[in-house]
Amino acid sequence: MKLKFLLITLITILVSSITIFNGKPKARVVKYLGEPDKKEIGVQPKGASKTIGRPTDNKDNKKKDKVDMWYYSNIVKSGKDTTWKRIEFTFINDRCMNIAFSN
């Protein structure tokens, strides 16, 4: 019974956070959560084309996408005693495209 409640709570949290922030600009995330604990810039590894087996060069469009990752700590609780230690927001061209939860 507790596990079922925990899973329902977790699903509710994930769905609500995804609908609030998915596709939205950075300003909305800052408005609701404040400044992140840590920020990183995404880079393409050398030799990525060989690893995934297809060209990664963007020859048609000269503009590269800007990828940022923002990290928040201990802001999402699922249940009474469970807190997600780290939440990662991935922004592509200043829009939130992915949210990841990890412990």
Image (cartoon, rainbow, N blue to C red):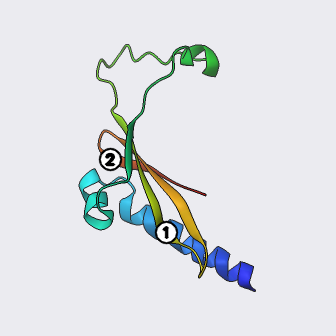
Res 101 → quadrant = bottom right
User: Residue at position x 49%, y 19% from top?
Assistant: 56
The spot of residue 102 in percent (x, y) is: 58, 55
Residue 45 visible, this angle = yes
User: Residue at position x 54%, y 74% from top?
Assistant: 12
Q: Nearer the viewer, residue 71 or 68?
A: 71
Res 91 → quadrant = top left
User: Residue at position x 35%, y 16% from top?
Assistant: 60
Q: Earlier in the sequence, mark 2 or mark 1?
A: 1
Q: Residues within 10 Å of mark 2 (few under 14, many from 20)?
A: many
Q: Quadrant of the N terminus?
A: bottom right
Q: Is residue 98 above or below residue 57?
A: below
The spot of residue 67 in percent (x, y) is: 37, 36
Q: Which mark is residue 95?
A: 2
* Alpha-carbon span between mark 2 and mark 1: 21 Å
Residue 25 visible, this angle = no
Q: Which residue is mark 1?
A: 76
Q: Are marks 2 and 1 in contact (CB under 8 Å)?
A: no
User: Residue at position x 51%, y 56% from top?
Assistant: 86
Q: Residues within 10 Å of mark 1 (few under 14, many from 20)?
A: some
